[in-house]
Amino acid sequence: AMWAYACNTIRDNLHLILAMSPAGTLLRTRCRNFPGMVAGCTIDWFFSWPEQALYAVSEAILAQVQLPEENQIGINQTMSFVHLSVTQKFSPEFEAKFKRRNFATPKNFLDFLANYMKFLDHNRKNLDTMSSRLDGGLNKLIQAAEQVTEMSKELEEKKVIVDANAVKVQELLEDIKQSTEKSTKRQEEANSAAEQIEKDNVVIERESADAEQALKEALPALEAAEKALEDLDKNAITEIKSFATPPPSVMTVCQCVQILKPLGKEDETGGWSGAKAMLSDVGILQALKGYNKDEMKEKQIKKIREHLAKDKETFEGEKMKSVSKAGDGLLQW
C-alpha cells in the first residue's frame, strides 16, 4: 500500500519537460518510436521570436556592454534585423534553391550577441593598444623637438666659440710659420747629429748581440731553476724542516732564500729558527713559484754570492744532492 501510494504521489506531482528542436528527422523518429510522447504529453510549439522580442533580448544583454547612448537603439535594431533577415529571407531562399532547410533558432541569436560582445571587447583592446603606441610616438616626437631646440641654442653658443678659436688659429699659423724657419735650421743640426747616431747604432748593435749571447747562455740555468722548483713539494720542505741542526750547506741555502724574501716577511738574522718559520708557512711553495725575479736588488744578489762563495765546491755540480735533495732544489731555485 505504501509503495502504491508513493508511486501515485510521484506520478501526480512529477512534471517532466522535454525540449526538442523540430529541425531534421530526429523528432519524427522519436514520436514514431515512442507514441506516448504525443499521446501522453502536452505539446507547446515555440515559434520564432518576433522582432519586439529580439529587440528586448538584445537590449537586455547589450546593457552589460558600454555603448554610446546615441547608438544603442540602432545597434539593437541591427541585431534583430540581421537575425530576422536569416529566418524570413535567406533561409527560405536557400530552401527554394537547394531544397534544404536551414534553421536559425533563438539560441543562434544569443550566440550572435555573445560573439558581438566578444569581438567588440577584442577590437577595443586593440584600439587601446594602438592608441597607447601612437601616444608614445607623439611624446617621443615632442621630446625630439625640444632636444632639437636646445641643441640649436648650444650650436649658436658654440659657433661664437668657434669664431673666436678661428682667430686664435690664424695667430697660431703665424707662429708656426716663424717656428718653421727655426726648425729648418735645427733640421740641419739634426742631420749632422744623425750621422753621429748612425755610428752609435753600430756600437749598440754590437753590444746588443753580446747581450743576446749572454741571455742565451743564462736561459739553461733559468730553465733548470724552474724545473727544480717544480720538483719541490710539501714532503721536500718537510725534509728540510726535520733537521734539528741542518748541515752547513743546507743552512747556507736557506739563508739565501731568506735574503730574497719570497714571502716578503722573512728575517735574515733569524738563523735556523727563522728559516724553519719561513718553510712552515703554507704559502711558501706558491710564493717560490710566483716570485718576481725582475725585482731582485743588486744588494741581495751580492749577499747571496758572498754566502755561496764560502763553500764554493759544495754548491757546484750535483754535490748538494748527496747532502739534501730538497736543499739542492732550493739551491737551483
Image: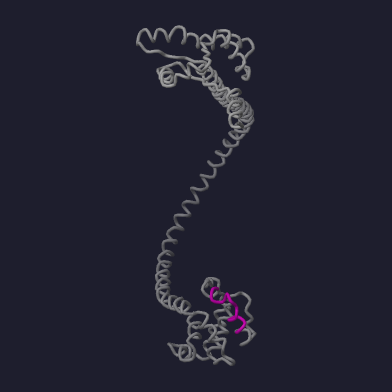
Residue farthest toward the left in the current orientation of the protein: 98
Between residues 11 and 292, which one lies in front from this camera angle?
Answer: 11
Colour basis: one colour
Q: Quadrant of the N terminus?
A: top right
Based on the picture, tell me whether residue 22 belongs to the magenta stretch.
Answer: no
Based on the picture, tell me whether residue 284 belongs to the magenta stretch.
Answer: yes
| Residue 306 position within the rendered picture, expressed as x and y whole percent measured from the top left | 55, 86
* Residue 144 visible to an observer of this rendering: no
* 111 vs 94: above or below: below
Between residues 29 and 79, which one lies in front from this camera angle?
Answer: 29
* 51 vs 246: above or below: above
* 4 vs 275: above or below: above
Residue farthest toward the front in the current orientation of the protein: 1
| Residue 205 position within the rendered picture, expressed as x and y whole percent measured from the top left | 40, 66
| Residue 273 position within the rendered picture, expressed as x and y whole percent measured from the top left | 63, 86
Residue appearing at x 59%, y 14% in the figure: 57
Q: Quadrant of residue 75?
A: top right
Start-end of magenta stretch? 276-286
Residue appearing at x 44%, y 21% in the figure: 34
Q: What number of labels is visible? A: 0
* Residue 245 visible to an observer of this rendering: yes
Q: What is the magenta segment's predominant secondary structure?
A: helix
Q: Quadrant of residue 214?
A: bottom left
| Residue 232 position within the rendered picture, expressed as x and y whole percent measured from the top left | 49, 80
